[in-house]
Image: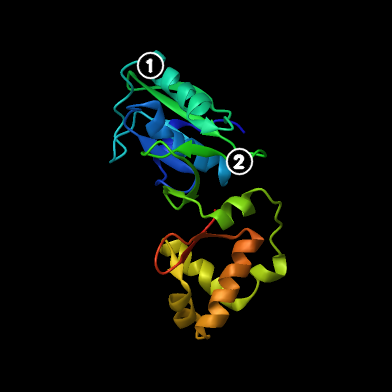
Amino acid sequence: MAFPTLNDLLSQTESSTLEFKRTIEAPGRIAKTLAAFANTSGGWLVIGIDDDRTVKGVDSEKDVVQKLEAASDLFVQPGVLVRYQMVQHDERLVLIARVDESEDKPHQAKDPQGQWQVYVRARDKSVPASKQMEKWLQETHDISPELLQQHNVKRLLAHLKKNEQIAAKQFAQLVNISEYRADKLLQQLTREGLLLVLDKQHPKTYTIRK
């Protein structure tokens, strides 16, 4: 995949496939983002950008590259391939890194307590995956075109384009079906690879995978 221009990336908001960082403070702090990209749909990590998307640049090209490589090699298992490109913007250096969706998933990264944890992307966040999701990541999935054409599924996807996540009760109210049927459909869409389940939240919620 060819690298986009920095202006193209700056014209977008953070998402499941794009994250901006002012700097990399320590390799372990960025590892979960790399693992989550590899476990989900791949993504772009842009370093040297402030929260308001102002270009600040990196202080040291060598330092940021070394931290990124340490994160991918030492704090993610199995390790992930990170491609990167340094670009100049108004005399400031910015690093654009690319992690592709991996064929070797699930990948783990160390959590703040030093434990290995599988992460996935949910909108613009890297979140811990459930045991069910870890198993799902090891399998191959094809989304049924017929499923995507269902009225309730279309309503759900339209909702998730505007909202970060949804629970079965909310979905039931949205499309006027029972909570039981809503939960069953959400589970089916998760198995098909369209949704991610965040079952460490209460109530259990779902978010769109891409």
Q: At 52% from the left edge and 39% from the top edge, which residue is drawn?
A: 108
- Count of all numbered marks drawn on residues in the image: 2
Q: Give the residue type at disc 2.
A: Glu
Mark on residue 101? Answer: 2
Placement of 73 over or under 8, stated as above or below: above
Mark on residue 63? Answer: 1
> Can see residue 43?
no
Q: Is residue 185 left or right of residue 159?
A: right
Q: Position of residue 50 (x, y in %)?
A: 29, 35
Q: Nearer the viewer, residue 121 or 134?
A: 134
Q: Position of residue 188 (x, y in %)?
A: 63, 69
Q: At 41% from the left edge and 33% from the top edge, which residue is drawn?
A: 30
Q: Position of residue 17 (x, y in %)?
A: 50, 44
Q: Give the residue type at disc 1.
A: Asp
Tag 1 secondary structure = helix
Tag 2 secondary structure = loop
Mark on residue 84? Answer: none
Placement of 167 over or under 55, stated as above or below: below
Q: At 48% from the left edge and 37% from the top edge, which residue is drawn?
A: 109
Placement of 144 over or under 139, stated as above or below: below
Mark closest to the chain's N terminus, 1 or 2: 1
Q: Position of residue 5 (x, y in %)?
A: 48, 31
Image quarter of residue 202: bottom left
How crowded is the residue under tag 2: few (<14 C-alpha within 10 Å), some, or many (20+)? some
